[in-house]
Every structure is written in C-alpha cells, then in structure tokens.
Image: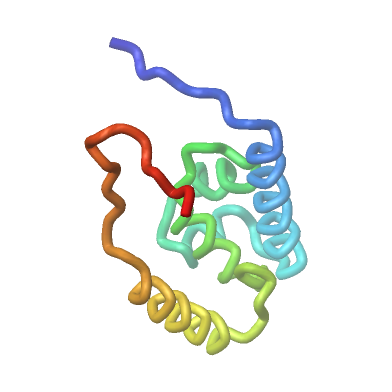
C-alpha cells in the first residue's frame, strides 16, 4: 500500500522553507558546501539539501542541529544557557498541570455555577 501524504497547511510549509533558507544562508556565509555541513552534522549531503529546501520529511532534530551548526539561533534565542532555563521553566509549569485529561462519561459538563 502506498504511503499517504497529507498536504501541509501553507503557513507550515512557508515556515519550513524559511528555516531551510536560514540554514542555507548560514552554510554559505561560512563558505561550506552541503557536503561540508553534512560531515559536520554526521548526515548525508542529500539530507542537508532536503532540509535547505524545506522538505517535510526532514526531522525536527536534524533541522535544529543543522541550524545550530550554521549559527541560526534556535527560537530566536542567541544564548544557549537561556534555552536550558526556558526548558526548566517549561518542566516546572507542566508539573503543575494534570498529567492527563479525562472526558466525563455522562453527557456534557454542567459548568453553569
């Protein structure tokens, strides 16, 4: 059976394209070939080219690693320590929320107080 591909919403594809352009720009500014970046990222040259073209199949981890290698700030944050701080804050906030959400079995919720 053929793999079914769902079309991305246009703004999501635009975001992938921009991310790829930023990676390519960073690579070119460093004077690296796609093969050079692939070696630094321990991936194939084809994966670098797919990332730079905004291919939806490139993993988020690979995109982030490539962006970091060429100096694109992740989430627009220059300081890597700030990313760790934000991760910790996120963990603290999630710890305050319920671990799961359950829907009531008996009809709609009466929330009219």
Q: Position of residue 113 (x, y in %)?
A: 47, 54
Q: Position of residue 24 (x, y in %)?
A: 69, 55
Q: Observer-nearest residue: 58 or 98? A: 98
Question: How many numbered marks have been drawn onto this rendered protein structure?
Answer: 0
Q: Residue at position x 68%, y 46% from top? A: 15
Tell me the quarter of the image containing the N terminus.
Answer: top left
Q: Residue at position x 53%, y 89% from top? A: 81
Q: Observer-nearest residue: 51 or 29? A: 51
Classify 68 as above or below 81: above
Residue 111 shown left or right of residue 7 in the figure: left
Q: Residue at position x 68%, y 62% from top? A: 27
Residue 59 shown left or right of residue 25 in the figure: left
Q: Observer-nearest residue: 3 or 70? A: 3
Q: Position of residue 29 (x, y in %)?
A: 77, 67
Q: Residue at position x 64%, y 57% from top? A: 33
Q: Quadrant of residue 54?
A: top right
Q: How is the image coloured?
A: rainbow
Q: Residue furthest top?
A: 1
Q: Position of residue 71 (x, y in %)?
A: 66, 73
Q: Observer-nearest residue: 5 or 103? A: 103
Classify 4 as above or below 95: above
């Amino acid at each position: 059976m053929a793999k079914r591909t769902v079309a991305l919403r246009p703004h999501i594809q635009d975001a992938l394209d921009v991310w790829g352009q930023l990676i390519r720009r960073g690579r070119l500014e460093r004077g690296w070939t796609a093969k050079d970046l692939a070696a630094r990222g321990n991936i194939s040259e084809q994966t670098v080219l797919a990332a730079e073209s905004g291919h939806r199949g490139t993993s988020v981890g690979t995109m982030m690693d490539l962006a970091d290698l060429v100096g694109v700030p992740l989430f627009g944050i220059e300081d890597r320590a700030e990313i760790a701080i934000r991760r910790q804050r996120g963990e603290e906030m999630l710890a305050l929320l319920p671990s799961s959400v359950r829907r009531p079995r008996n009809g709609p919720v009466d929330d009219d107080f």
